[in-house]
Image (cartoon, rainbow, N blue to C red):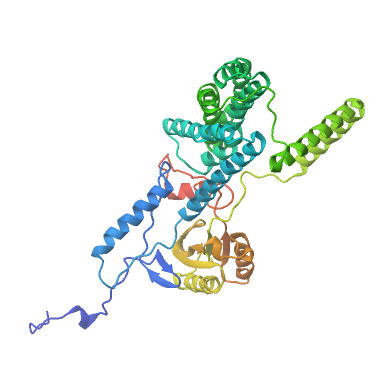
Amino acid sequence: ANPDGSTVRLRDVARIEIGGLNYQFTTRVNGKPQAGLSVLMSPTGNALATASAVEAKMKDLSRVFPSNITYDIPYDITPVVKASITKVLMTLGEAIVLVFIVMFLFLQSIRYTVIPTIVVPVALLGACTVLLIAGYSINMLTMFSMVLAIGILVDDAIVVVENVERIMSEEGLPPKEATRKAMSQITSAIVGITLVLIAVFIPMAFFPGSVGVIYRQFSITMVAAISCSALMALSLTPALCATFLKPIKAGHVHEKKGVFGWFNRKLDNTRDRYSSTVGWMLQRTGRMMIIYAILLVGLGYAFVRMPGGFLPIDDQGFMTVDVQTPSDASYNRTEAVIKQVEKYLMERPGVSEITFLSGFSFLGQGANTAQAFVTLKDWSDRSSKESAAIIVNETNAAMASVRDAKVSALEPPPIDNLGNSSGFSFRLQDRGQKGYTALMDAT
């Protein structure tokens, strides 16, 4: 108070305004200041489950927000996961339909075709059970392996059905007796083929390092699906053949008229030409071996000359931009560069939202650093000239003219947490408690 007892208020001696505790970190979305909140998934977390939980929680919290406050989630890595799983599911369905069509074309009977088709979902269900027991989830790797395994899954069932059909048409036996005779002939072959395929895929489960982590789920899924297929070929498929097939007379032949007749004639002609070609090659084994050796040399040369890489980089629907001004630059100087980057990106076709975090980047922390997380439009809304790779390259070319900062646009790593961009990452810890200076010197 004043000596005369009057009150001195803060507004009498200062300008009062609401502001941040500090300005080391600020968040901007599409060029406007925002309050930001980041959620990092744990190493063992599930991206889709985490994203759903965050959305549900924010929706619940928004009920108590003031009327002039809303929330938005501008940066989300799960759309690419959802799109990839949807694509794999579509591919899985297409593969099953194509397998059904091909089997029906060759077996030319709906009953013979339905039996292998029934085996596929049962075998895949067994593979999913093994994945659940092993602690794995349905993801792109496991579903991709299921797509590849479909051909193997129906192969065992087709062998059983075809052999039963052959015995019925040649000997006129009823389905039950024909199935017994067929299984006595091919059981050992099915077991042998299964063991060979398992021996091919099982070593992948023991690869060390990141490669092992990536391929282990693929290997386990393939081995589980192949094992379930063999089990079905020795149990479910014979039971279906014995109960579902109808007896046929001895000497039964495939259709000779219509579409099936045309297909059978073409198939017979192709088989005859193939047989004559093989016979011609067997009479010239020396020259064929020379050609084979030339092909091996060409294969080895192509393998050596082809570029190598750990994982292919794909358009994941977002990108990042690093901004670094000189070490003694102020926040205002960095903000000016941020506005330049925002202006370019917001005018760039294919860009949906831009989230800028100043004071932090993959290059370090401080008033001279900033990091942008750029969400691109949906893949269906972008042309081939608006892919993530093209946008990254053109952004780097456009920002190269910024003389007051280093601006680097990057694509995200193919696998989350396996590098901040296409490459690798590591963490350096001060376990000896030697302090910040020693840690920076070691860096």
Relative to residue 307, is residue 404 depicted above or below?
below
Residue at (70, 24) in percent of width and height: 251
Image side of residue 380 versus residue 335, left or right: right
**Residue 339 visible:** yes
The image shows a total of numbered marks equal to: 0
Residue 255 % position (x, y): 69, 35
- For this orientation, the residue located farthest to the left is 5
Residue pictured at 52% horizontal, 41% vertical = 143
Does residue 362 sit above or below 298 in this rendering?
Answer: below
Is residue 397 or residue 129 the one in the foreground?
Answer: 129
* Quadrant where the image shows the N terminus: bottom left
Provide residue 275's location: percent of width, then percent of height.
Answer: 83, 29
Residue 114: quadrant of the picture: top right
- Position of 277 with respect to 139 (left or right) is right
Residue 319 percent location from the top left of the image: 54, 59
* Relative depth, front residue between 438 and 316: 316
Whether 317 is drawn above or below 243: the answer is below
The x and y percentages for residue 364 are 49, 57
Q: Is residue 247 left or right of residue 76?
A: right
The answer to whether one can see residue 443 in this image is: no
The quadrant in which residue 10 appears is bottom left
384 or 249, nearer to the observer:
249
